[in-house]
Image (cartoon, helix red, strand yellow):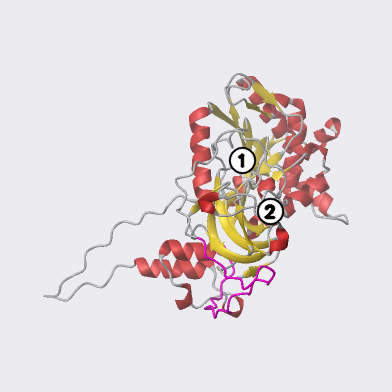
């Protein structure tokens, strides 16, 4: 008889307690190979495919799309050939398992230590009884199930499928606006909007249907993680904000000069990132975080620079690791790579964790200023508003200059206002006179 092996949800390297099932990539009865992805799950950081370390026939799946599975709870059971090894005991629900060490999953590394703020699991769905697989003789291979004829729906993104589930939209009934009829998120949103339109008034004498109740959008995945993190930051960190207007004319001129030469283009964000790394070298107390118990301040030797980026899943904060060691050109390249990954939703959990300082360019939204909530457990965040032509006194005369507003939000436990003001003033001086950076490099 084949041995039924149980594959549990691994720790995806984020210190989280569970993940939400987005879609299953296999059915009960399917034959799978070793390290074949079997399910797509969404954590607080990213949507990832989870490969199974066993090859054989899928005998059971645990968790429906939209449900959360705890780390260490069963995902699938697989009937493997007897050569995998004799059963040496019983697993959960009486499933036989072996004492063989499970092979490492492809694509996952060592999990980060728990720093608090772990997402709590609401509940684990009851596991269905595993489906038995009949085998004619112990040495006979397991026969695959008969092929199915699934309904092909022209949709790729699991986020589109999820949006359709949340709004009760039948994807098979939609006509996609994308290439080759591909169903896009906008198609689902239009269908949801049309579904929510009020029904025509009933004719006199007819019985009108009851009014629909107000809709409730569940906090799940990234949205829930953001809500929990911002709430914790607002509750635990005594944050303060200061700001200053700066003349960015010379900085923009420097960018034009750099981009006039052959080589990769340098973005404004890359120049601001370089200014941040130099400023943090002068004010290292701001590249820190308060310990979990509040008894000390943890100073970080490396600058892991987070920056706000808008992606398909919403606003995320990718992290440029070791930013202080990168040149301006290298910073620009890494910022561009992570921004594109955020746009298409391909950021990995490792690229979204471990930041020590955040650069928030909210000027891309066309606004001048903001008082953001700190990215817990970080102690500081620099905000940059739009760069716009304004009247400005320059060298004693009124002139039209390119001006931006810089804001600095900081944890008042790690420093006083003098340190925060000194940091912000240094950043503003570098924006106004970028040649100052040469003295610091």
Q: Residue 57 appears in which quarter of the rendering?
A: bottom right
- Residue under numbered circle 2: 339
Residue at the extreme left? 205
On screen, residue 342 versus residue 20, left or right, reads right
- Where, quadrant-wise, is the N terminus in this rendering? bottom right
Which region of the structure is painted magenta?
Answer: 130-158
Upstream in the sequence, badge 1 or badge 2?
A: 1
Instruction: Tell me which residue sits at (47%, 49%) in the image.
Output: 124
Main SS of residues in magenta: loop
- Where, quadrant-wise, is the C terminus in this rendering? top right
351 or 382: nearer the viewer: 351
On screen, residue 377 versus residue 205, left or right, reads right
Q: Label 1's element?
A: loop
Q: Label 2's element?
A: helix
On screen, residue 94 versus residue 211, left or right, reads right
Magenta stretch holds residue 147: yes
Instruction: Tell me which residue sits at (50%, 49%) in the image.
Output: 223
Percent x, y for residue 177? 54, 75
- Residue under numbered circle 1: 15
Q: How many marks?
A: 2
Q: Are marks 1 and 2 in contact (CB under 8 Å)?
A: no
Viewer can see residue 24: no
The answer for how far apart the CA atoms under marks 1 and 2 are is 24 Å
Mark in the foreground, 1 or 2: 1
Percent x, y for residue 266? 78, 51
Percent x, y for residue 19? 55, 50
| In this view, 148 is above or below 406 | below
Near mark 2 (Cα within 10 A), the count class, few <14, some 14-19 or many ≥20, is: many
Percent x, y for residue 123? 45, 47
| In this view, 311 is above or below 423 | below
Near mark 1 (Cα within 10 A), the count class, few <14, some 14-19 or many ≥20, is: some
């Amino acid at each position: 008889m084949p041995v039924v092996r149980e594959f549990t949800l691994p720790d995806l390297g984020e210190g989280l307690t569970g993940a939400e099932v987005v879609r299953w990539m296999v059915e009960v009865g399917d034959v799978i190979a070793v390290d074949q992805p079997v399910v797509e799950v969404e954590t607080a950081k990213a949507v990832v495919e989870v490969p199974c370390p066993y090859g054989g026939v899928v005998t059971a799946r645990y968790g429906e799309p939209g449900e959360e599975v705890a780390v260490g709870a069963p995902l699938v059971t697989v009937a493997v050939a007897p050569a995998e090894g004799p059963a040496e005991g019983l697993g959960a629900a009486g499933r036989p398992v072996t004492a063989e060490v499970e092979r490492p999953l492809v694509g996952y590394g060592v999990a980060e230590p728990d720093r608090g703020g772990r997402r709590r699991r609401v509940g684990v769905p009851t596991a269905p009884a595993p489906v038995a697989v009949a085998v004619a003789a112990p040495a006979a291979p397991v026969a695959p199930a008969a092929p199915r004829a699934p309904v092909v729906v022209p949709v790729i993104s699991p986020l589109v499928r999820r949006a359709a589930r949340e709004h009760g939209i039948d994807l098979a009934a939609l006509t996609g606006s994308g290439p080759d009829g591909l169903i896009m998120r906008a198609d689902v949103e239009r269908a949801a909007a049309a579904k929510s339109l009020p029904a025509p008034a009933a004719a006199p004498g007819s019985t009108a249907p009851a009014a629909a109740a107000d809709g409730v959008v569940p906090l799940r995945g990234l949205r829930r993680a953001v809500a929990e993190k911002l709430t914790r930051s607002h509750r635990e960190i005594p944050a303060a904000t200061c700001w200053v207007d700066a003349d960015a004319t010379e900085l923009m001129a420097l960018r034009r000069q750099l981009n006039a030469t052959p080589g990769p283009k340098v973005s404004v964000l890359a120049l601001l990132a370089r200014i941040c790394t130099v400023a943090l070298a002068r004010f290292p107390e701001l590249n820190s975080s308060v310990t979990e118990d509040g008894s000390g301040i943890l100073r970080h030797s490396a600058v892991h620079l987070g920056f706000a980026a808008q992606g398909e899943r919403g606003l995320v904060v990718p992290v440029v690791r070791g930013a202080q060691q990168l040149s301006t050109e290298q910073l620009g390249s890494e910022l561009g790579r992570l921004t594109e990954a955020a746009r298409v939703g391909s950021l990995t959990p490792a690229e979204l964790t471990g930041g020590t300082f955040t650069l928030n360019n909210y000027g891309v939204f066309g606004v001048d200023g903001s008082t953001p909530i700190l990215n817990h457990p970080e102690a500081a965040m620099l905000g940059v508003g739009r760069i716009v032509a304004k009247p400005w006194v320059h060298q004693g005369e009124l002139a039209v200059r390119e001006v931006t507003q810089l804001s600095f939000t900081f944890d008042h436990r790690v420093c006083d206002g003098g340190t925060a003001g000194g940091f912000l003033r240094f950043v503003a001086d570098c924006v106004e006179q970028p040649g100052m950076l040469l003295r610091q490099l």
